[in-house]
Every structure is written in C-alpha cells, then in structure tokens.
Image (tube, rainbow, N blue to C red):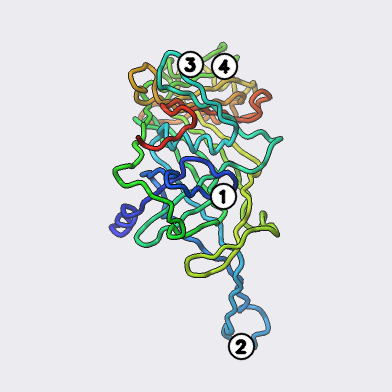
Amino acid sequence: MAQTEFYAHNVSAFMSKDYEGAVNTMETGDDDFLRIMVDANAPPLPELLSVDPTNQTGSGNEFESGVVIVSDYFDVVRFDVGDMLNSDIGGALWHQALSGGLTNAAVVGSIGAHDHSFGQQLDSTSFNVLTRTFIWSVGGIKYLFGGCGVDEYTLTWDGGDYPRFKASLISTGYHNPLSDHATIVLPALEDQLIFKYLQSRGASLSWTGTPWGGLYDAAASGRFMAFSLSVKNNLKVGGKERQPNDPVITDADGNEGAVQNRLRRGKREATARVTLRLDQLEREKKAQVSKAINTGLLVSFPGPKIGATVARHTWTGKIPKFRVLKVTPDEMDNEEVVHLDLKLYKDAVTGGQVTGAVRNDVATSILALPA
C-alpha cells in the first residue's frame, strides 16, 4: 500500500485545455496544458504489440526456441480520470463525452457567468469523437499521449455531500516523450487548477409524465435520494480500426510501431437510474406498467457562486425522452426507497438520448488557464 501511495503522489497529470484539431495532432504549445489533481489509475506507458511465433508447429524441439518478435502496433492506452463533480474538467469531459456542438452564452443579469450547452454528436455527422492530449509524468518517465477520447462518462450521487464523475479515456496509442517538445512549459504545482466543486445541497431533479400528473419535481417533494447517469461511446480500437495509412512512430528507445489514425465511436449507449424515497402512491409502478414515454428529465448540481452574482457553477444533464424500464424496492440508509431504471430514447429535436450543460465563469469555452 505504501508503494502505491508513494507512486500515486509522485505522479503529475496534465490535460490540454483545448481539443486537438484532428486526431493525433497533439497540443504542444507553451500554454496549452492544465495541471490537474484527480483520482486516476496508474499512468499508462506505451506498449509495443508483437507477434511471437515460437509456439507454432515445426520447431522440432520440445522447448520454445528461436524467438522471433515481429513489431506491429503500439497498443491503445486506457486510463480513467475522476473526482468529485466540478464545473472545470468534470464539465469539460462531460462535453467531450457527448462531442456535440458547443453553444456559449452569457447569463443575463449575472456579470461573469456563462452557460455552455451541448448535445450528442448527430448520427448523420462524422463518427470521429473529440480528442485531447494528456501528459503523465512520474520520475524520469514523461510522455505525451495524443488522440485521447472519452469512451465512457459516468455521474453518480449516492445521497452524500458531493456527486462524483469518472471519465474512461482511450488513446490511439500516439505518443511522444516530453523531451521531444522543448516548447512545452508545464504549469508548476502552485498553478494547479483549483476546481469549483459541486454539491448535493440545492440539487434539482424533475421530469414530466402522466403518472405523476404532469411536471414532477422530485427534489422539491423531498424524495430525491440518489442518481446515476452513464454515456458510453464504445470507441472502436485495435484490430477493428487498422488502416493502410496509419502513421508509424518511434519511441524514446528507438522502437518503431504504428498507431491507429482515427478514433471513432460505435453504437452509443446511455443508461440512468433514479432513486426515490418510497411513499404510499404507486406512480412509479404505474409508469412502468403503462410503458408511457416521459419527457424532459433534468438533473443539476450547483456549486459556489460566480463572483458577486446569484448565478452558481452548475453541472446539468437532460434526458429528453425516457420510459421507466424497471422498478425495484430497496433500503438505503435505513430508509425504504425505490430504484427506477430508465430506458432512454432518441429525441427528434436534439438528435440524441442525452444533452448537457455547464455554467461557470469562462466565456468562450469550458476551460481556461488559471489567472
């Protein structure tokens, strides 16, 4: 355990403020990166795939011999980034997961507050997802990883003080040692991005459905107990995405291998679960049995005020159309509750199953360098 903690505490993590102009076109400017402190798995290292034919018939020997390793591709790199929910990287990775167009607007009457709204990438447009560049540094091991896309984004709130998010990312395998980029000046520790953490106090959850008599405010009713939402892009990697024009790169040790030249989504999936305090009415069960389509589910978590205004840093998720798929009675913290597993449907107006929004103090994008 001590070695694990030592290792984790000595890792530095950096995320590009902006998206890559194209997959594998890494951000390499001297002010492109934010230093971030997050919950993450061990930082990845490039791994060269290989073919080992020594176990094939014909060696004429009981033992494997005549080892031949054929260099092929650098493997894709997988890592997770998570934390208590915030309007900074928690919001930025929320948009990256959906990859739809970003609309920025000033909040009327709240100077310095800005709304950023977005949906899922339309299924009639490019299948390529938005990508960023990450840098992992531990000791003398310092690598840039390009072509990092969000494979899955999950928000969870279990009734505690703070909701949490986790983004599972996949890189194409494109990488360079940091020493190859003399122009990159990484932020110092004191320049760590200070997150604006969001909380459960003031959270909202509402939707519209016939079994509830129209618009139903679950938070105002005092029944809102827990929530989870997951959006998965099912990114295509490995053998499914090899192309003749995939670029060949050489790592710091002179090992040569190809990397995939695109990062495309597969069939997207979105799931959600709502947990409510049980009451004496049967609205939720009626909603499941009737198979009724309900609309306009909105969940949001607020945070600190933005400047001197009444506006607050906020994360928002919206589900335009859904059906209650399953109703499960349960117990949570010695209270009777009911879990609603939702089936999400494509909405004709937004073109997807989910939309999102972030409110913060950045005008033209969700992230900005620390002042």
Lower sequence index among marks 3 and 4: 4
- Residue at x 51%, y 57% (from the top left corner): 175
Pick the front one: 82 or 361: 361
Which quarter of the picture shows residue 31? top left
Three-letter amino acid code of the residue under disc 2: Asn
- Residue at x 29%, y 43% (from the top left corner): 190
Q: Are marks 4 and 2 in contact (CB under 8 Å)?
A: no
Three-letter amino acid code of the residue under disc 1: Thr
Q: Mark 1 sits on what residue?
A: 25
Pick the front one: 132 or 64: 132
| Spatial CA span between label 3 and label 2 | 73 Å
- Residue occupying the far front of the picture: 183
Q: Mark 4 sits on what residue?
A: 208
Secondary structure beneath label 1: loop
Lower sequence index among marks 3 and 2: 2
Q: Mark 2 sits on what residue?
A: 61
Secondary structure beneath label 4: strand
Give the label, 3 or 1, closer to the camera: 1
| Spatial CA span between label 1 and label 2 | 48 Å
Which quarter of the picture shows residue 182? bottom left
Q: Which mark is residue 91?
A: none
